[in-house]
Amino acid sequence: MGVQPTAKPQEAPPGLDDLDPLLQHRSRLGAMVLLCNADAMSFTRLRQLLKETDGNLGAQLRKLEDAGYLTVEKQFADRKPITWYSLSPAGKKALRRHLDALQDVLRSSAR
């Protein structure tokens, strides 16, 4: 005997439609969260903290940069290139909106 549903399907939970598809990837969300509390962070440090490969992290950061969520500055130190990332104002706003939507989703599922 199968399980019978007890109620008709409801609408999507509050906040679900407000989640940013770009920030639903672990590496992209992780980078944004790390950068929200830093003025800037190097590619190397982000790679270490997120435990990503160069290629994967580079691709994910490029998507955030293309969306206008990150600013990028390239420098040289001891003749070695260093790429610095920081959140743009649009990135800060997008992260806040996404985290607020996540909280709404969590609240609605805890009822």
Image (spheres, grey):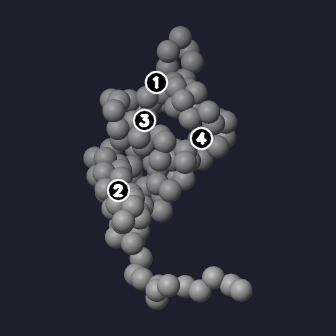
Q: Nearer the viewer, residue 27 or 80?
A: 27
Between marks 1 and 2 in the image, the one whose residue lies nearer the viewer: 2
| CB under 8 Å between discs 1 and 2 | no
- Please say if 16 is above or below 67: below
Q: Residue at x 41, y 40 (%)?
A: 33
Q: Earlier in the sequence, mark 4 or mark 3?
A: 3
**Seen from this angle, which residue lies furthest right?**
1
- The percent coordinates of residue 56 (x first, y second) are 64, 43
Q: Report the Cα–Cα distance between label 1 and label 4.
A: 19 Å
- Please say if 10 is above or below 81: below
Q: Earlier in the sequence, mark 1 or mark 4?
A: 4
Q: Amino acid at mark 4?
A: Leu
Q: Residues within 10 Å of mark 4 (few under 14, many from 20)?
A: many
Between marks 1 and 4 in the image, the one whose residue lies nearer the viewer: 4
The residue that disc 3 covers is 34
Circle 4: element type: helix
Q: Amino acid at mark 3?
A: Leu
Q: Residues within 10 Å of mark 1 (few under 14, many from 20)?
A: few
- The percent coordinates of residue 23 (x first, y second) are 46, 54
Q: Amino acid at mark 1?
A: Gln
- Please say if 12 is above or below 85: below
Total numbered badges shown on the rendered structure: 4
Q: Residue at x 49, y 42 (%)?
A: 30
Between marks 4 and 3 in the image, the one whose residue lies nearer the viewer: 3
Q: Earlier in the sequence, mark 1 or mark 2?
A: 1
